[in-house]
């Protein structure tokens, strides 16, 4: 599942999730201030926040296999509920996109050490 030379580090994954959660809140606030034309940016940031919260809730970040199973279960869900988004279909599309991104990072065991605001 991962590169054997680089072990899974649950602390780094939790730190990355917490950082992305904070960044998504800042992005939502910025999009909200920009108004009508930034509705897609708001939904995208809300989707990233939803994904980070869903992955932080269970204690599955210690090992790579349970984390990957949690991702697979989330990807398999029919719909994702959130309040305050502008377009539910667009929000769900962004949630699936973020889940696929994190699943790809999990399979490769790469990218969790990148803490920049924009990725």
Image: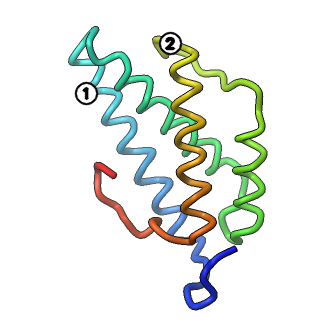
Q: CA distance from mark 1 to mark 2?
A: 18 Å
The residue located at (51%, 31%) in the rendering is: 94
**What secondary structure is marked by label 2?**
loop
Please say if 91 is above or below 106: above
Q: Is residue 68 left or right of residue 110?
A: right
Identify the image quadrant of residue 53: top right
- Image position, residue 47 (x, y; %): 51, 32
Please say if 102 is above or below 8: above
Query: Which disc, if any, is residue 86?
Result: none
Contact, mark 1 vs mark 2 (Cβ under 8 Å):
no
**What secondary structure is marked by label 1?**
helix
- Image position, residue 69 (x, y; %): 78, 56
- Image position, residue 71 (x, y; %): 70, 50
The residue located at (68%, 70%) in the rendering is: 62
Q: Is residue 98 left or right of residue 107?
A: left
The residue where tag 2 is placed is 87
Work out which quarter of the rendered image holds the N terminus and state it: bottom right
The residue located at (57%, 76%) in the rendering is: 9
Which numbered disc, 1 or 2, marks the residue closer to the eye?
2
The residue located at (64%, 77%) in the rendering is: 2
Q: Is residue 71 left or right of residue 26?
A: right
Within-10-Å neighbours for mark 1: few <14, some 14–19, many 20+: some
Q: Earlier in the sequence, mark 1 or mark 2?
A: 1
The residue where tag 1 is placed is 30
Within-10-Å neighbours for mark 2: few <14, some 14–19, many 20+: few
- Image position, residue 66 (x, y; %): 77, 63
Q: Nearer the viewer, residue 60 or 108?
A: 108
Please say if 100 is above or below 68: above
Q: Nearer the viewer, residue 38 or 108?
A: 108
Q: Nearer the viewer, residue 35 or 56?
A: 35
């Amino acid at each position: 599942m991962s590169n054997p030379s680089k072990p899974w580090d649950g602390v780094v994954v939790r730190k990355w999730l917490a950082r992305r959660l904070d960044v998504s809140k800042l992005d939502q606030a910025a999009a909200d201030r920009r108004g009508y034309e930034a509705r897609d940016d708001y939904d995208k940031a809300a989707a990233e926040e939803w994904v980070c919260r869903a992955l932080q809730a269970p204690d599955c970040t210690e090992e790579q296999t349970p984390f990957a199973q949690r991702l697979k279960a989330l990807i398999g869900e029919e719909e994702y509920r959130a309040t305050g988004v502008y377009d539910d279909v667009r929000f769900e599309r962004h949630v699936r996109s973020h889940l696929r991104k994190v699943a790809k990072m999990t399979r490769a065991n790469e990218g969790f050490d990148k803490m920049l605001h924009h990725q």
